[in-house]
Image: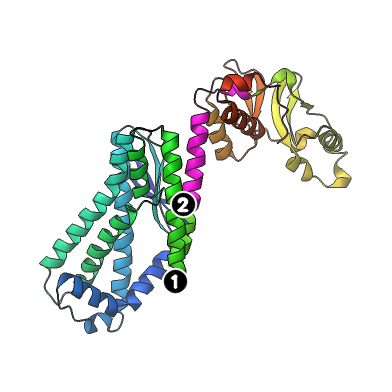
Amino acid sequence: MRGIRIGSAFGIPIRLDITFLLVLPLFAWLIGSDVSNLTGVINGLFGTAIAPDPLTQGSMRWILGSAAALGLFLGVLLHEFGHSLVAMRYGYEIESITLWLFGGVARFTEIPEDWKQEFTIAIAGPIVSVLIGVVSYAGFVALPLGDPALFVLGYLALTNVALAVFNMLPGFPMDGGRVLRALLARNRPHARATQIAAEVGKLFAFLLGIFGLFANLFLVALAFFIYMGASSEAQQTVMKAAFQDVTVRDIMTPREDLHVVDEHTSVADLMERMFRERHTGYPVMRGGTLVGMVTLDDARGVRDVERDAYRVDDVMSDDLATISPDADAMEAISTMQQRGVGRLPVVDETGEFVGLVSRSDLVTAFNIIQSRGSVESFAREPTLDVRS
């Protein structure tokens, strides 16, 4: 979820996902189409007597719908800034805030593991939403009865408080789920607290989805993303706990055990080696120096009849993401995800190519650590081939 950058505040980039550009006019239309009923709700809740008829004349309903939709998403943006500014106070870096289909997402470079910090960061967003609701209500009370802006302020007072309440439900990774994890982590390991909160979040998502089938299909889609988010973060946290104090050196395939290919090898010969050795990627060497990586996808890009004419250096990638043998295993995972690659050359401080770490190395290491409980047990396993 990268989105279109529209600016920044407090050093945090603000982005709009394409889904936001689609849902904003939809929300404006839905609110504008329902101005009369929403006015009745506002009157009933706040004890006012706003006349709905003047608000539905001509283009007024669409103006009010657009203003209310923009105000709603501005409130969501401020909600995310509530999380982000508190996190920055604790020293965490915020990659961006992105508005999308289901509201807003603040991307942290690191998830807090101190339960007090996570609790404070998680609760900050709903507090901001409540404050926005209070300020909107104060404006609502101050305006004269016939002002059309009463509808917008009343709507924002209602929806921002509702947003805060909904976010505090225990649907991890929503705010309430993160508060639950923080409280669980007071006397449990962070990974275990995450697993429990994720299970509660998935149960919440299931119940929300069932409710949405009878009430609103939008809730079904939201339930799906809550379920996927809970599963993903739980998996990431458990993996981080497993790889604690594990370095790339512990899990990489050393240089002397690697299968490599010369840059002058034909693509036809490369394909034959891939079939024979069951590898889908090779470091490419020029003499004793690493000059690139070549994968099965690279070779497939050459037509069958031309594979004898093309060499590996014609199709290889020479824009290499490398990693140090002393880097954390989680850094290797993050780099692979960001670069969209399945393997990373390992280069020491002198620039020498000393090994390769692949997704299969990481998966195998994770499975062994999980089953045996330590990286030392992994170190006793036979050296792995690179097959992914």
Residue 114's x, y, as percent? Answer: 34, 32
Q: Residue at x 73, y 18 (%)?
A: 256
Element at label 2? helix
Q: Residues within 10 Å of mark 2 (few under 14, many from 20)?
A: many
What amino acid is found at the position of numbered circle 2 in the picture? Lys
Asked if the stretch drawn in magenta spans residue 241, the answer is yes
Residue 31's x, y, as percent? Answer: 33, 72
Residue 191 occupies which quadrant of the picture? top left
Of 53 and 364, nearer the camera is 364
Residue 279's x, y, as percent? Answer: 77, 34
Q: Is residue 124 visible?
A: yes
Residue 189's x, y, as percent? Answer: 41, 32
Q: Residues within 10 Å of mark 1 (few under 14, many from 20)?
A: few
Q: Calculate the distance from the C-alpha at mark 1 to the C-alpha at mark 2.
A: 19 Å
Q: Is residue 22 above or below residue 383?
A: below
What amino acid is found at the position of numbered circle 1 in the picture? Phe
Q: Which numbered disc, 1 or 2, marks the residue that appears first in the sequence?
A: 2
Q: Residue at x 66, y 33 (%)?
A: 360
Asked if the stretch drawn in magenta spans residue 33, the answer is no
Q: Is residue 265 left or right of residue 19?
A: right
Residue 252 occupies which quadrant of the picture? top right
Of 294 and 223, nearer the camera is 223
User: Which numbered circle lies on residue 180?
Assistant: none
Element at label 1? helix
User: Which numbered circle lies on residue 202?
Assistant: 2
Per the rendered image, the range of residues in magenta is 228-251
Judged from this view, the residue extending furthest toward the top is 350
- In this figure, what is the number of numbered marks? 2
Q: Which residue is mark 1?
A: 214
